[in-house]
C-alpha cells in the first residue's frame, strides 16, 4: 500500500502555512538567490484592488441583466482603484464594461483584474528548462537544493532545502505563470497554474490537477537566463503604503543592516512603475550613546585527549558586557564598566539546562537531558545594545529625542536572528518575544531589559548549526534541545551578565543615597543650630518692636526641623522594612530547603510504610526512624532563624552550631554519596563569637545546599561527558581558632575567575532556570555583614578555580 494524497494538500503547504505576504515574498526572493541571481525585481501592478474586484462582482451579480457603468461607478467610486493606476486604464474599464450582459461583464471583470492587477518577481539566475519545470518545479519536496547545500564547494550559500518554497505563491494569488529559461536554450519555457481549481472538489487527488509546461517565445539571445513569476487573481489588497511598509520593515532587514561587512540584498521593488526604497541605512551614531552592550560567541575549539588523540571539542562562551552608569554613579576615570564573560562546558551544562531535567539518565541510551543540545548546538555570535529610553530622554537633548525614538521604533524589538546572513522569521518582529524579555521585565523593577530597549542580532550558519532548522510554516526554529540551549544562552547573557552588572549599580545607588542622607542630616542639624545661635544674638540687639519678626524666624526654623524629623522617621521606617524583607527572604530560603527535605522524606516514609506492611521486622523501620530524626533536627534549626524578634547578637559557640548543622545533613550527604571532613582542634570547643545565631545557620545552609548541587552536577558531568565514573565527592569544613576563621570547601568544578566578582550579586546564578534564583549567596553575604563577619572567597587552587569560602570573625 502507498499513501494517497488529496490535491488540497498543496493548499495546506502553500497558502495555509505561509503566515504573511512579507514571508511569501521572502521565500520567492530566497529561491531567486539560490538560483544565483545577483538581482531580483519585484513589481506590484494594481489597477483595481481585491476589495474593488469583490465589490464590483457582487453589484454585477445582484444588478440588472446588463451593466450600467454610470450606476456601478456611483456605487464603487474611485476608492477601489489604485491612486497610482493610469487614468486611461481606469477609463477603459468603465467604457468597456458599460452595457455588457451580466455573465459577459463578470468574465470581463475577471480578466481585467487578473491582467492588470498582479505581482511579478523577476530574476537573472540560472533559470529552468522545459524538463526542469516538469521534473523539478512540479515535484514537491525536491532534494536538489538540499544536495547543493551539502555539496557546495564554491562558497555559494543555499537558503532553501525543503523544496516547497515555490508554493508560497499561493499566499499571494490564485494564478501563477512561470516563464523561465536556461542559458543556451533558444526559447522560453512556460507553465500556467490555477490554484483555485484545488479549492473546488475536496476529494480530488493530486493526479487530477493537471499542469503541463509548454515551449514559449523565442529568446532575443540564447545567453539570457532567468525566471519570471507572474502571480495574479491576488488574494489581498495591495497599496503603495502596504508595499512600502513591507519593503522598509521586512525586506530591508532580510540581510543584516547592522553588519558592516554584509553585502546589499540586491532587490528592486516597484509599485505601478514607482520605485520603492527597500534599503534603510542603519545609523550607527546612536550606538555610541548606548547604556549597555554585550558581545558573546559560543566557541568550539578542537580538543585533544590525554593520549594525544583527537578528543571532544572544547566548548566555551566567551565575550564581554558593559554598562554606562549615570555620571554620579560612575567610578572616576571609568565612564563605562566592562566585565568579561567566560564559561566552560561544565558551567554551561548547568546554566543552560532545564530545571526539571535529570542529572543522570540511569544508564539509558542517549545520555541525560541536561547534557543534550549544547554539543550539537554549534558556534554562534550575538551582539546587543541596550538603551534606557527614559534615561536617554532625561540626559539627552530633548529636541533630538523624537529622532532617537523613531530610530528605536525601527530597530529595537529584541535580537534579530540571521542564518548565513539572511534573516530567520519571525524573531524580533513587533509581535514576537522569543527570548521572553518582556515577560521577565514585567516581573522585575527599576531598569527594564525589555525587547523595546534592545537592538541587536544573532548570527548562525547552516553549516555549523545543522540542528537549528526552520519550521515548515516559517514561523521560527523547530523546538529542539539545540534551540532551547540557544535561547537560554542568550537569556543568561542578557539577564545574568548584563542584568547583573546593572543590578550592581542599583545597589550602589541605595548605598550612595544612604550616605547622602547621613550627610544631609548632619548639615541640617548644624545649620539649624547655627541659625538659632544667630537668632538669639539678634534678639539681644534689635528693638522691642522688632522682636516678633525674630520669633517668626525662630518658628520657621522649628517647622523646618520638625519636617526633617518627620522625613527621617519615614526614611528610617523604610530602611527597617528593607531589613525585614532581607530577613524574610532569608527565612524563605531556609524554609525552601526544609520543605524540599519534607517532600523527599514523605515519599521515603510512604515507601517504608509499604515495606513495613510486608515484613514487620524490616530494616525499613530503622531507616524511617533516621529519616524522621534528621527532619526533626532540620525543623529545629528554623527556631533560631525564623523569629525576627530573636535576631539579636549573643555569644554563640561556633563549633557547636557547625556540628549541629552537619549532623542534620548526614542523611543528605549519605544519599548524595558525599564524604564530609570536619577539621577542628580540641581547643576549638571554646570558639565563640558575638553574632546572630540564626544568621550563621543560614550562611552554612546556603553553602551546603550549593555544594551538594554542584558536586552532583560535577559527578554527572564527568560521567556523561568524559566517561569518568570514580569521582568521590568531598566537603571540608575547617575551624582555624587562632585566626578566628572557618574554611568551607568542596572538590567540585569550582568557581571560575570570570564569575568570581559576580557570585554575591543579587539574581546572579549558574543553576538552571527554576532551580536557582541568585539570592542565596547575596543574602548570606548581607547577613554576615550585619553580624560583623566577612564571607568571601579564599585564594584560588592551582588550576585557577575557586573552591573555598572563608568566614572571617576577626
Image: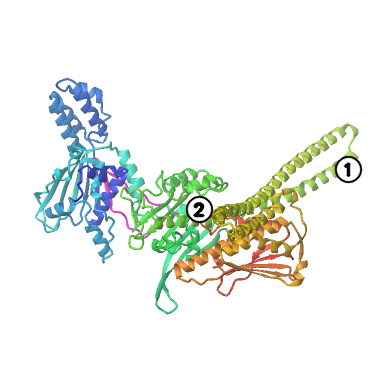
Q: Position of residue 652 (x, y in %)?
A: 76, 60
Q: In this rendering, does residue 773 appear at all?
A: no
Residue 699, by quadrant, is bottom right
Q: Which residues are magenta?
A: 260-282
CA–CA distance in space, label 1 to label 2: 55 Å
Left-right relation of 442 to 216: right
* Badge 2 density bin: few <14, some 14–19, many ≥20, Cα 10 Å: some
Is 777 placed above or below 213 here?
below
Please give the residue where the numbered disc 2 appears in the rendered image.
Answer: 289
Label 1 Cα crowd, 10 Å radius (few <14 / some 14-19 / many 20+): few
- Lateral position of residue 463 relative to residue 87, left or right: right
Number of marks in picture: 2
Residue 129 pos. (x, y %): 13, 55
| Residue pictured at 70% horizontal, 59% vertical | 696
Compared with 564, 484 (above or below) is below
> At x 76% / y 53%, what residue is drawn?
648
Main SS category, magenta section: loop
**Of callouts 1 and 2, the N-terminal one:** 2
For the residue pair 75 and 768, the one nearer the viewer reads as 768
Residue at label 1?
A: 537
Amino acid at each position: 500500500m502507498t499513501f494517497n494524497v488529496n490535491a488540497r494538500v498543496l493548499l495546506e503547504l502553500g497558502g495555509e502555512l505561509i503566515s504573511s505576504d512579507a514571508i511569501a515574498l521572502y521565500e520567492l526572493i530566497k529561491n531567486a538567490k539560490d538560483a544565483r541571481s545577483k538581482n531580483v525585481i519585484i513589481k506590484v501592478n494594481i489597477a483595481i484592488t481585491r476589495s474593488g474586484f469583490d465589490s464590483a462582482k457582487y453589484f454585477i451579480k445582484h444588478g440588472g441583466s446588463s451593466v450600467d457603468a454610470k450606476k456601478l461607478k456611483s456605487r464603487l467610486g474611485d476608492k477601489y482603484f489604485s491612486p497610482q493606476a493610469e487614468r486611461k486604464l481606469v477609463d477603459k474599464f468603465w467604457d468597456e464594461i458599460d452595457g455588457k450582459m451580466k455573465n459577459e461583464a463578470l468574465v470581463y471583470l475577471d480578466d481585467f483584474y487578473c491582467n492588470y492587477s498582479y505581482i511579478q518577481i523577476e530574476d537573472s539566475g540560472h533559470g529552468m528548462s522545459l524538463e526542469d519545470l516538469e521534473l523539478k518545479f512540479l515535484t514537491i519536496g525536491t532534494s536538489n537544493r538540499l544536495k547543493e547545500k551539502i555539496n557546495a564547494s564554491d562558497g555559494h550559500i543555499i537558503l532553501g532545502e525543503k523544496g516547497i518554497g515555490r508554493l508560497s505563491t499561493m499566499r499571494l494569488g490564485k494564478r501563477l505563470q512561470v516563464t523561465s529559461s536556461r542559458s543556451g536554450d533558444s526559447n522560453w519555457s512556460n507553465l500556467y497554474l490555477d490554484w483555485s481549481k484545488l479549492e473546488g472538489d475536496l476529494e480530488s487527488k493530486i493526479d487530477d490537477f493537471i499542469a503541463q509546461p509548454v515551449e514559449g517565445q523565442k529568446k532575443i539571445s540564447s545567453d539570457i537566463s532567468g525566471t519570471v513569476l507572474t502571480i495574479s487573481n491576488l488574494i489581498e489588497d495591495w497599496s503603495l503604503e502596504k508595499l512600502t511598509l513591507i519593503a522598509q520593515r521586512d525586506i530591508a532587514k532580510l540581510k543584516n543592516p547592522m553588519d558592516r561587512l554584509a553585502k546589499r540584498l540586491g532587490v528592486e521593488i516597484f509599485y505601478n512603475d514607482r520605485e520603492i526604497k527597500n534599503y534603510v541605512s542603519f545609523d550607527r551614531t546612536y550606538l555610541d550613546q548606548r547604556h549597555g552592550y554585550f558581545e558573546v560567541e559560543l566557541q568550539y575549539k578542537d580538543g585533544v585527549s590525554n593520549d594525544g588523540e583527537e578528543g571532544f571539542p572544547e566548548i566555551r562562551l566567551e565575550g564581554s558586557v558593559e554598562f554606562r552608569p549615570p555620571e554620579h554613579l560612575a567610578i572616576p576615570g571609568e565612564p563605562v564598566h566592562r566585565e568579561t564573560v567566560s564559561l566552560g562546558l561544565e558551567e554551561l551544562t548547568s546554566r543552560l539546562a532545564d530545571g526539571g531535567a535529570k542529572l543522570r539518565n540511569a544508564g539509558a541510551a542517549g545520555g541525560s537531558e541536561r547534557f543534550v543540545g549544547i554539543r550539537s548546538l554549534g558556534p554562534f555570535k550575538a551582539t546587543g545594545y541596550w538603551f534606557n529610553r527614559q534615561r536617554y530622554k532625561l540626559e539627552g537633548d530633548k529636541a533630538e529625542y523624537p529622532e532617537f525614538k523613531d530610530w528605536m521604533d525601527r530597530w529595537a524589538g529584541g535580537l534579530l536572528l540571521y542564518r548565513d546572513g539572511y534573516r530567520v522569521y519571525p524573531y524580533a518582529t513587533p509581535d514576537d518575544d522569543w527570548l521572553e524579555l518582556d515577560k521577565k521585565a514585567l516581573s522585575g523593577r527599576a531598569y527594564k531589559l525589555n525587547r523595546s530597549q534592545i537592538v541587536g542580532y544573532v548570527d548562525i550558519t547552516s553549516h555549523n548549526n545543522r540542528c537549528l532548522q526552520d519550521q515548515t510554516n516559517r514561523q521560527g526554529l523547530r523546538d529542539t534541545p539545540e534551540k532551547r540551549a540557544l535561547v537560554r544562552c542568550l537569556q543568561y547573557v542578557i539577564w545574568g551578565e548584563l542584568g547583573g552588572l546593572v543590578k550592581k549599580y542599583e545597589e550602589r545607588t541605595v548605598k550612595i543615597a544612604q550616605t547622602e542622607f547621613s550627610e544631609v542630616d548632619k548639615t541640617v542639624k548644624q545649620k539649624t543650630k547655627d541659625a538659632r545661635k544667630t537668632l538669639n544674638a539678634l534678639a539681644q540687639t534689635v528693638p522691642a518692636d522688632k522682636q516678633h519678626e525674630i520669633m517668626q524666624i525662630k518658628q520657621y526654623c522649628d517647622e523646618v526641623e520638625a519636617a526633617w524629623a518627620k522625613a527621617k522617621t519615614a526614611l528610617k521606617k523604610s530602611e527597617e522594612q528593607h531589613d525585614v524583607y532581607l530577613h524574610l527572604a532569608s527565612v524563605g530560603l531556609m524554609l525552601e530547603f526544609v520543605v524540599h527535605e519534607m517532600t523527599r522524606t514523605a515519599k521515603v516514609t510512604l515507601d517504608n510504610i509499604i515495606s513495613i506492611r510486608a515484613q514487620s521486622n524490616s530494616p525499613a523501620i530503622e531507616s524511617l526512624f533516621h529519616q524522621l530524626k534528621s527532619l526533626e533536627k532540620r525543623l529545629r534549626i528554623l527556631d533560631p532563624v525564623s523569629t525576627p524578634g530573636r535576631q539579636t547578637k549573643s555569644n554563640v559557640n561556633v563549633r557547636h552550631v557547625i556540628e549541629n548543622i552537619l549532623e542534620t545533613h548526614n542523611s543528605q550527604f549519605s544519599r548524595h554519596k558525599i564524604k564530609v571532613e570536619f577539621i577542628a582542634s580540641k581547643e576549638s570547643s571554646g570558639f565563640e563569637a558575638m553574632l546572630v545565631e540564626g544568621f550563621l545557620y543560614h550562611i552554612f545552609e546556603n553553602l551546603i545546599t550549593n555544594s551538594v548541587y554542584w558536586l552532583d552536577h560535577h559527578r554527572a558531568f564527568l560521567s556523561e561527558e568524559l566517561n569518568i565514573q570514580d569521582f568521590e565527592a568531598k566537603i571540608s569544613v575547617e575551624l582555624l581558632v587562632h585566626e578566628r576563621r572557618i574554611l568551607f570547601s568542596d572538590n567540585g568544578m569550582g568557581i571560575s575567575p570570570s564569575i568570581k566578582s559576580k557570585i554575591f550579586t543579587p539574581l546572579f546564578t549558574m543553576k538552571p532556570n527554576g532551580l536557582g534564583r541568585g539570592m542565596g549567596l547575596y543574602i548570606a553575604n548581607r547577613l554576615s555583614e550585619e553580624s560583623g563577619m566577612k564571607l568571601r572567597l579564599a585564594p584560588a587552587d592551582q588550576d585557577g578555580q575557586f573552591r573555598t569560602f572563608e568566614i572571617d570573625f576577626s
